[in-house]
């Protein structure tokens, strides 16, 4: 039932991502009006429980969602199968998680 | 007399197209064209057919790039500028000319155990033709096992493990059939492969009997998801 669990994980992470991506894009549009500065960004994010929660969820969902999709692409178009691919994708997910959390830590 | 320029695949996987000129007749089917070539031009042409009336599922071939049941496909529908190119089905090993080895198609069917499993006792209530579960099963029941969907499907081409639209369509009819005794077994079998469907709907587009395997597979994905997350699924609908 591994495939069924991966399917479930990808669909649920997509449900989490969909509103967060819209929120993220909306924030980008809002943030760049009248120029973009580090102070402005940091003043919004530093010590904010709200933005910490939003981007924490975002990073977690992306780290689950992206490797499952990439796995499907590599299986079908790259003809790569088996445990090696699964390990590589798990590592890719951990990499995304680490990079995302590191970026969050820098602005929170 | 009007003539048709026909190209037919000759040989195995490494064969080649060969051209034939065939008389063009009214209401002529693609199978009529192939039969004319074999009877009047080249008796060594290998192809498969049986009933000639769209019931047996033997005569499927690729006609101008599209998988079709050739006995029910009029040349006037398939020809482009008086030309017809007839090849073997995609996604199956070519034996010779227009005959493919159907074994992989039926082996996947067998491996998924996509067949009716009698329950210990008959349903307590009679099965009404219009109850939702029976209607869902009926929607997919007229499959003739022609492998047109299997040839049309890109997911089959990309994934050797993918059981294909016909097998999953059959599983969906069984999952909805209250008389069947192994709903969970069918869902487990579907769960091993239904997620490889990319919902391109090539099967539904190509199915000669007008079935919609994509919808059946979407139903399977839904029920497998429910079973995966909840441990049990909704009872069969009455």
Image (spheres, helix red, strand yellow):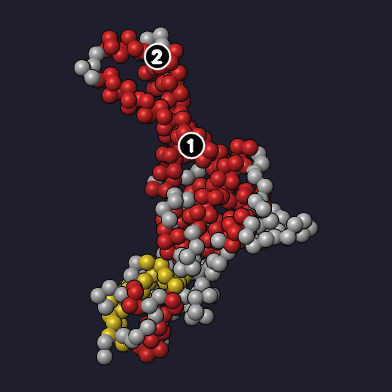
Describe residue B214's horizontal placement relative to residue A25 as left or right. Answer: right
Q: Nearer the viewer, mark 1 or mark 2?
A: 1
Can I make out residue B63 in this image?
Answer: yes
Q: Looking at the picture, tell me which residue is in the foreground, B100 or A69.
A: A69
Which chain does the residue under circle 2 lie in? Answer: A
Dot 1 or dot 2: first in sequence order is 1
Residue at x-position 53% and y-position 38%: A8
Residue at x-position 37% and y-position 18%: A103
Instruction: Indicate the quadrant containing the C terminus of chain A: top left, top right, bottom left or bottom right.
Output: top left
- SS at mark 2 in the image: helix
Q: Which label is found at residue B206?
A: none
- Whether discs 1 and 2 lie on one chain: the answer is yes
Is B231 located above or below residue B83 in the figure? above
Marks 1/2: CA–CA distance = 26 Å
Residue B120 at what x, y percent from top left?
A: 78, 57
- SS at mark 1 in the image: helix
Residue position marked by numbered label 1 in the rendering: A10
Residue B75 at what x, y percent from top left?
A: 35, 78
Describe residue B156's horizontal placement relative to residue B116 as left or right. Answer: left
Instruction: Indicate the quadrant containing the N terminus of chain A: top left, top right, bottom left or bottom right.
Output: top right
Residue B143 at what x, y percent from top left?
A: 54, 66
Residue at x-position 55% and y-position 67%: B142
Residue B212 at what x, y percent from top left?
A: 49, 59
Residue position marked by numbered label 2 in the rendering: A105
Q: Within 10 Å of the Cα at label 2, are there few (<14), some (14-19), or many (20+) other Cα atoms?
A: few
Residue at x-position 65% and y-position 39%: B231
Which chain does the residue under circle 1 lie in? Answer: A
């Amino acid at each position: 039932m591994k495939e069924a669990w991966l399917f479930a994980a990808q669909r649920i992470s997509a449900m989490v991502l969909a509103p967060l991506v819209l929120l993220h894009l909306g924030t980008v549009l809002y943030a760049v009006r009248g120029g973009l500065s580090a102070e402005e960004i940091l003043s919004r994010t530093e010590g904010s429980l709200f933005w910490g929660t939003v981007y924490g969820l975002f990073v977690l969902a992306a780290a689950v969602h992206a490797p499952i999709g990439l796995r499907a692409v590599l299986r079908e178009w790259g003809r790569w199968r088996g445990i090696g691919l699964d390990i590589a994708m798990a590592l890719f997910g951990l990499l995304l998680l680490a990079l995302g959390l590191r970026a969050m830590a820098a602005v929170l | 007399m009007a003539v048709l320029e026909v190209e037919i695949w000759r040989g195995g996987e490494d064969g080649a197209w060969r051209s034939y000129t065939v008389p063009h007749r009214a209401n002529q089917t693609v199978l009529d064209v192939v039969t004319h070539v074999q009877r009047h031009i080249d008796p060594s042409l290998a192809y498969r057919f049986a009933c000639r009336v769209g019931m047996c599922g033997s005569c499927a071939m690729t006609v101008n790039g599209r998988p079709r049941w050739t006995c029910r496909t009029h040349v006037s529908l398939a020809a482009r500028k008086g030309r017809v190119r007839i090849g073997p089905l995609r996604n199956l090993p070519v034996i010779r000319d227009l005959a493919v080895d159907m074994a992989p198609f039926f082996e996947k069917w067998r491996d998924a155990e996509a067949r009716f499993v009698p329950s210990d006792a008959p349903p307590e209530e009679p099965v009404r033709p219009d109850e939702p579960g029976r209607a869902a099963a009926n929607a997919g029941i007229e499959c003739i096992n022609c492998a047109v969907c299997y040839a049309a499907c890109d997911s089959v081409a990309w994934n050797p493990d993918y059981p294909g639209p016909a097998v999953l369509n059959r599983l969906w009819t069984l999952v909805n059939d209250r008389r069947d005794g192994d709903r969970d077994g069918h869902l487990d079998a579907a769960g091993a492969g239904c997620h490889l469907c990319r919902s391109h709907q090539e099967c539904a587009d190509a199915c000669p009997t007008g079935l919609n395997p994509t919808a059946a597979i979407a139903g399977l994905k839904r029920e497998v998801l429910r079973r995966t997350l909840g441990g049990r699924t909704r009872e069969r609908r009455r």
